[in-house]
Image (cartoon, grey):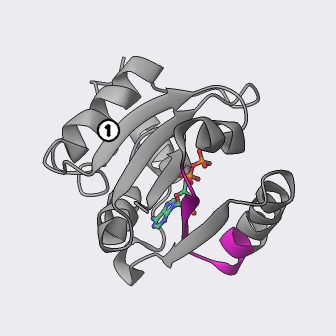
Amino acid sequence: MKTSAIFPGSFDPITKGHESVIIRSLGLFDSVTVAIGFNAEKKSLFPLELRLKWLKDVFAPYPQISVAFYEGLTTDFCKKNNIQYILRGLRTSADFEFERGIGQMNKNIFPDIETVFLLALPEYNSLSSSIIRDIYRNGGNISSFIPEKIQLPPLK
Ligand code: ADP
């Protein structure tokens, strides 16, 4: 059976940390769907279309990676698309505690799913979309924190 995984997130914006986990996972799965989940409680800084375009540009060289957007539960998206694994990255013990709660609840509501974690590379351990947004909003240079292929729009 082919193995497929989803890497869900907001990618507001995508960082080198996300990119690294997704590319490093390619040895584990036949296909990986990088998916932007709609989260009613989270207002994004960058519009959905732009975040999707970034994902498509960054992962264009990898035929095993597809890009998607979904609303509703990640586990429902997995059921519909025959995805068996949820891929996440771990930077800190805080990430672990947060991810454990989500992973155990996902397993509870969809017993066929398994969550797989890859550790962040040390050089990306402090990278987060929220820190990048902060630096960007204040006019700082964020280019070394995001994938080389993408550019954030000029600050208005
Ligand atoms: P969201 O809050 O929208 O889920 P995040 O960027 O916080 O988006 O997280 C998406 C996934 O990416 C999570 O599993 C998170 O731990 C992981 N992640 C975020 N930044 C990094 C990084 N620098 N290195 C490795 N994994 C990361």
Say how many tags the image has. Answer: 1
Residue 14 vs 118, above or below: the answer is above
Estimate the x, y position of residue 107 in percent, counting from the top left: 79, 61
Q: Does the residue labelled 1 lie within 8 Å of ligand 1?
A: no
Viewer can see residue 92: yes
Q: Is residue 106 magenta?
A: no
Residue 11 visible in rendering: no
Q: Give the range drawn in magenta.
A: 83-96
Residue 149 appears at what percent x and percent y? 16, 43
Residue 96, placed above or below residue 57: below
Instruction: Name the spot of residue 17 as percent of width and height, x first.
Output: 39, 63
What residue sits 72% from the left and 72% below the top?
A: 94
Find disc 1 in the rendering and name its residue.
Answer: 55
Quarter of the figure that contains the C terminus: top left
Identify the residue shown where x is 23% and y is 46%. 59
Up-down relation of residue 47 to residue 122 (above or below): above
In the image shown, does 57 or 14 lie closer to the viewer? 57
Please tell me which residue is depicted at 69% across the width and 80% down the height of the picture: 93
Give the residue drawn at x 40%, y 39%: 136
In this rendering, would 43 be left or right of 5? right
Q: Which amino acid does label 1 sit on?
A: Leu
**Seen in the image, is 67 located left or right of residue 84?**
left
Dot 1 falls on a residue whose secondary structure is helix
Q: Which quadrant of the rendered structure holds the N terminus?
A: bottom left
* Side (left or right) of 11 relative to 30: right
Rendering coords of residue 64 (x, y %): 26, 52
Q: Which of 85 and 48 is in front in this view?
A: 85
